[in-house]
Amino acid sequence: MLPFIPEPLRIDNVRTKDGAGLDVLRADLVHPVISGNKWFKLRYYLEELQEQRRRHIITFGGAYSNHIIATAAAAHALGLRCTGLIRGERPPVLSPTLIHAQQLGMQLHFLSREVYKEKEVPAALRSEDMYVIPEGGYGAKGAAGAGTMLSGNTRIYSHICCATGTGTMMAGLQNAAAPGQEIIGISVLKNNHDLENEVRQLLHRPHQPVTLLHQYAGKGYGRHTPELLAFMNEWYEQTGIPGDFVYTGKLFFAVNELLRQGFFPTGSKILLIHSGGLQGNASLTKGTLIFGDY
Ligand SMILES: *Cc1c(COP(=O)(O)O)cnc(C)c1O
């Protein structure tokens, strides 16, 4: 297991520009690289790997993936061999994420989009002691790990809102939620209508309602607009909390809008999950954001 989890996570109280009060669960602070929900999603995979005495982690992801960098850093911390199977042909210039992953000892292996889709480890890379972690940490273990972001001090909230990519974190939160707590997922992928089904596959009670909002994905995964970036700066000025443009920026934007629209009943107590991912901002032109080194 990784040794550095502070439990329970810190919760910050903030006020929006319109004067609404909200709380933010700071999972982004658990580790500088293995940040946010990626730490939590990895924890039970790493536990199983250690039980099975495997020494070589293999996982899948894109060139900017928070899961790739988190897995590289976890393998580094545990002294394990690590291979990243990366979607697409090797680009002439590696992304900041891949450069960092490589520095942490991850071996990069590029797969064409066609081959990548199969999610299979190429025969030449297989080894007896390999342990394969699914893309994005998707799966029951990933969800169970994400569920441990909640603890006694999060039981007071009526609504818990999170950014949603694969749906693993959302499902885990929903499985771990107290009775009556509503989990709201803000999808960051445009028109990803398989998502509800993917969340349901990880739910302990698959017939529960699933609240996913699709209208805040903007131009789609990893795409940003001047409006989103301006909001992230404004939000930082207002709350002191940095976001990333792929996930949490969209979450903060969405919740700010939902509050304006009166989406939440009076008396709601709202918790936002800061799921980390700030390293993704490294691909922005320097000076775009007023926080971090981006
Ligand atoms: C991966 C990620 C998510 C999405 O988590 P899923 O479990 O894939 O839905 C949200 N926020 C951040 C910062 C992430 O890196």
Image: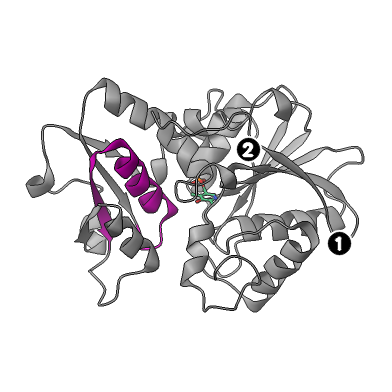
Image quarter where the N terminus lies is top left
Instruction: Relative to 156, say whether 29 is above or below.
Output: below
Position in image of residue 289 (x %, y %): 62, 72
Q: Name the residue at 66% across, 55% down.
A: 251
Nearer-the-camera pick, 76 or 14: 76
Query: Relative to residue 67, is residue 50 depicted above or below?
Result: above
Query: Residue 191, position in %: x, y?
Result: 54, 59
Confirm whether the magenta stretch covers residue 63.
Answer: yes
Beta carbon at label 1 within 8 Å of ligand 1: no
Q: Residue 130: horizontal and vertical position, in percent?
A: 18, 36
Amino acid carrying label 1: it is Lys
Q: Which residues are magenta?
A: 62-87
In the drawing, what numbered circle is on residue 271?
none
- For label 2, count other residues whose C-alpha is less than 10 Å away and answer few (under 14), some (14-19) or many (20+): some
Is 137 placed left or right of 122 in the picture? right
- Determine the secondary structure under disc 2: loop
Identify the residue at horizontal 32%, vertical 64% (top origin): 99
- Given the image, on which type of amino acid does mark 2 rest? Val
| Quadrant of image for the C terminus | bottom right
**Label placed on residue 210:** 2
Question: Circle 1 sits in a helix, a strand or a loop, which is it?
Answer: loop
Asked if ligand 1 lies within 8 A of label 2, the reply is no
Q: Quadrant of residue 239?
A: bottom right
Q: Nearer the viewer, residue 213 or 104?
A: 104
Q: Does residue 1 sit above or below 198 in this rendering?
A: above
Q: How many marks?
A: 2
Residue at figure coordinates x 57%, y 71% from the top left:
224
Q: Which color scheme did the rendering employ for the protein?
A: one colour
